[in-house]
Structures are given as structure tokens and as C-alpha cells.
Amino acid sequence: MQREKRTRLRWLDAARGLAMLLVMIGHTVPGNETVIGALYTFHLPLFFVISGYASRPVRDGRAFARRHVRSFFRLIVPCVVLQMGLMVYFCLLEGNLSAGRLIGLEKRAILQLFWASAQSVSGRPALGIPWFMFALFWGRMLFDLLRMMLKRHAALACVLVSAAGLAIGTAAYLPQSLDLAMVSVLFLCAGEQLRRMDALSPRARRGVLLAAALVWALGLWQGVRIDMAVHQYGPYGLGIPVSLCASAVVCALMQRLDGCAPLSVPLAFVGRISLTVFLVHHVDDYFMDWWYRESWGLCCVNRIVVVVGIAALVHAAAWGVRRAIGGMRRSRESK
């Protein structure tokens, strides 16, 4: 069986990069209602929609297992390593490297990773930003499973699973952010439908996007928001259709701006390393002195520059390590 072939679309990476920057801005200007009101109509669901757009169905169980083993090492393992490392850092910061203190903090990290929740609930310690990585991992797996098993009826199944996740999330938080993963299946499915929409005639596509823009504008006017991290989907769940429409419009805009290299190339770079940016953003409070300023505009710019810069260095270092390991393997094989 051949490995999955991937062709990267620059506009898709640019849309992912834009979403990543908007996440950081949203975390930097919590008191600015105008900015927050606009961002929280779509910025995090856009990640799931983009992932669904880029995803192709798996043909069989072997391809399914291979894809999600890779996804586990790409999404979950870095979160585990980072969170466990943070506990060691806390011990060093306290000047207390006793076995009891270290074990206590590592137990806390295990609980954080088990629940993978953005906020503390019923005394359970919050994991924070990496909840998204867990929701994306399980959401992708569930989405692929539904497509592989149900094929023609997968879209309907995605709607039902998402509705079930929405209902469960209003009553209880599931471990590993599984209720959010269930909700994300609808966004992943919407991304796949958005890709299929590319086959429509230009006139039909413009009509669909115009309708989506009107729904988004109405949602903005009514102050409808969606914040998946805290299980808020707007009144009667209206944040979900508004965010789907907004994501479709943003994707269309990024496609049109693909030819503007000064804008699309830097955004595409951020998009390609967005998972590393997420993890660096998770710990950027520990070096707040590097980016915090009184002006929220300057604060946003500084935070983005510092976080993306560190993520780029980490990404480059990881690439260098992989190259070195690959070179050593080839050297041994040639002997």
C-alpha cells in the first residue's frame, strides 16, 4: 500500500496561519469587546474546517491505523513531553527537587493530560491551550472512522455525532476533550464539503458565499459567539452555523489572496508550523517580560513576533535533528 501523497496548498496554510495569529490576538486582548466579538465568531472552528478540507478518506483499516499513529506522535506526544517538562521546570523554579514534590507535580500533569480540559472543572486541573491538540486528534480519528464505515451516510452521521457531543458537553466534560472532539466532527465534515464546493460553477459558488457572508454578518450584529474551549456555542447553538459560514468566507478570501505573496507567504509559514506555535503559545506566560506592553496593539505584535520566532527556531532545530538522524541511518545502511 502506497503512503498518502500530500500536496500543500499555500492558501490553506495561510488560512491556518491567520487562524493561529487570531488565537494569540484573542488571548491578548480579552477586554476589547469589539475585537473579541469578531474573533469568537470563527477563529478556532476555522482550524477544524481547514483540517477537514485537507483531509482525504482512508480506504481501509491499515491506512487508518497508519494515519492516526502518525497523528498521535505529531499531536499528543509533544503535549505530553512539554507538560511533563513543565513540572520539572516548576520544581527547579521552586528550588525543590525532592522526589515527593516532583512526583506530586507529575501526578498533576497526568491528570491534566487525562482530562485535557481548557479550564478547571470540579477540582480537575486544567491543561490549557493544548486541549485543542487532543480534540483535533480524536476528532480526526472519529471523522475518518465515520467516513470509512458509513461512506455515503457519513455526513449525516457527523451531524448526529456533533449534536450528541453538544448535548453531552452541556452536562459534563468528558476526558481527553472527547465531547469537543465529537462537536469538531461537524467542522471537519464542513471542511470536506467546502472542498467539494470548489467543483461548483463560479456563479453558484458566489451565491453560496454571499449567503454565508450574510449569516456571518447577522451573527456579528447579534453578538453570537462560539468558544469551544469553555463549551459555549451561543444561544441555541447558533454559534456553530455562524462559525461555519464565517470559516467558508475566510477560506474564500484566503484563496483570492493567494497571489499576494507579501501576505500569503508569511501566513503560510506560520500555518506550516502552527502546531509548534500552539505549544510555544501555551508556555509564553513564563516569558511575558519579552512581549508584554501597555498598549494592546503593541502587545499583540510583540507576542506574535516572539512566539512565532521561538517556534521557528524550535522547528528548525527539530528539522536539523531529523536530518542528522536520517544521515546516520543512511551512513549505517551504506556500510
Image (spheres, rainbow, N blue to C red):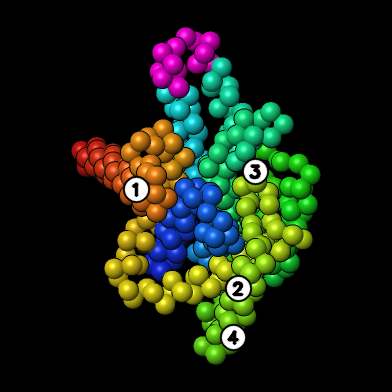
Mark 2 and mark 3 in contact (Cβ < 8 Å)? no
Mark 4 and mark 3 in contact (Cβ < 8 Å)? no
Q: Measured along the vertical axis of the image, is residue 67 above or below residue 332?
A: below
Q: Nearer the viewer, mark 3 or mark 4?
A: 4
Q: Nearer the viewer, mark 2 or mark 4?
A: 2
x and y percentages locating residue 170 in the rendered image: 76, 48
Mark 1 and mark 2 in contact (Cβ < 8 Å)? no
Q: Earlier in the sequence, mark 2 or mark 1?
A: 2
Amino acid carrying mark 3 in the image: Ser
Residue at image coords 40%, 18%: 92
Instruction: Please tell me whether mark 3 sits on a helix, a strand or a loop.
Output: helix
Q: Which mark is residue 177?
A: 3
Q: Quadrant of the C terminus?
A: top left
C-alpha gap between disc 2 and disc 4: 15 Å
C-alpha gap between disc 2 and disc 1: 30 Å
In the picture of the structure, the residue carrying the numbered disc 4 is 207
Count of labels in the image: 4
Does residue 282 appear left or right of residue 319 in this picture? right
C-alpha gap between disc 3 and disc 1: 31 Å
Q: Nearer the viewer, mark 4 or mark 1?
A: 1
Instruction: Please tell me whether mark 4 sits on a helix, a strand or a loop.
Output: helix
Residue at image coords 32%, 74%: 260
Range covered by the magenta-colored residues:
90-103
Instruction: Please tell me whether mark 1 sits on a helix, a strand or a loop.
Output: helix
334 within the magenta span:
no
C-alpha gap between disc 3 and disc 4: 36 Å
Q: Earlier in the sequence, mark 3 or mark 2?
A: 3
Amino acid carrying mark 2 in the image: Ala
Q: Earlier in the sequence, mark 3 or mark 4?
A: 3
Q: Nearer the viewer, residue 97 or 186?
A: 97
x and y percentages locating residue 135 in the rendered image: 60, 48
